[in-house]
Amino acid sequence: MNDNYITGKFGKTIFYKDNFFIGTFKIEDSSVKLPINTRVLGYIDNVITFETYKLYGKVINDPKYGKEFKFDHFEVLPREDENSIINYLSSPLFKGIGEGKARLIYNKFKEKTIDVIKNEPDKLLLIKGVTETNVNTLHEGIIKNSSQSDDLMKLNELGFKTEYGLKIIKLFGNKAIKKLEKDIFSPYYYLNIPYNIFIKAAHDNKYDINDNRILKALVYKAFRNYLYSKGHIYLKIEDIYKAVSDDWELKNKINEELLEDALKSLIKEEILIKDKDKYYLKSDYED
């Protein structure tokens, strides 16, 4: 991870597709010397122009645009002042609220507004004009936004850059962290994220080299690489054994019993299908 950071607000969007953002950023604080209005690029979901962000990354020199800041992860800083809170609550993230209701809510709870919405939402019904629908919209929206930001930070800490973190959250929703705590390879079977990202995270989390979770991922890796290079749609046990044994991670360290346990797990989880002595990816078998 890069330790350099810039803090401030997003400005003009120049390009945005598949969560990849290029645009301007007005810097309020930084660990590196850059113009106040700097061009930034990186992966982010739901850019909110009035929010204060802390972007972590590095300065790069583009031949055409000069110095830019490329961020690999970020955090949304707490909303503490009146304008920030009112702008947030009246934003398109919360349909049906508007500036009027947002101001009424802030005037009632002041700097505790976000905490009240998150932890004691029924108190909002004490405010004239605030409906139960408004309360649900605010509470669910803030929980979702807070949860996603927290989950992205945790995924960053696990070694998944924001580009991959957003994909994992989209796949698993609010269960993403629990899924990875159980098996750090769980997104590998569904997303196009390199194996080396997962194996590094597994090592960092002290997975044993013969852990069933690593073996399952290696078997799936064999199907991704070895299978298609041979032009077949299935592998036999001897093909899988060779592909997994050839992997530098497990050179001369695997036995057939461990491999069969991994295969049984993948079949139980409906990732593989066995037909007689042939193993198929479920997606290939059913297509």
Image (spheres, grey):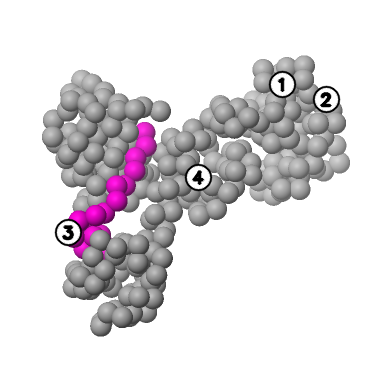
- Viewer-side label of 3, 2: 3
Pick the front one: 15 or 113? 113
Q: Which residue is mark 1?
A: 250
Residue type at mark 2: give it: Asn
Chain-order first, disc 4 or disc 3: 3
Determine whether label 2 and label 1 are within 8 Å by CB.
no
Three-letter amino acid code at the position of disc 3: Asn
Q: Amino acid at mark 4?
A: Ile
Q: Is residue 66 above or below residue 105?
A: above
Location of residue 271 with respect to 135 vertically, above or below = above
Packing grade of label 2 (10 A; few <14, some 14-19, many >=20) is: few
Residue type, mark 1 in image: Leu
Q: Secondary structure at mark 4?
A: helix
Mark 3 vs mark 2, CA separation in Å: 63 Å
Q: Which residue is mark 3?
A: 83
The front one of 23 and 144 is 144
SS for callout 3: helix
- Residue at 22 percent across and 26 percent down: it is 32
Cα separation between marks 2 and 4: 32 Å
Q: Quadrant of the N terminus?
A: top left
Q: Is residue 111 above or below residue 239?
A: below
Gap in Å between the C-alphas at discs 2 and 1? 10 Å
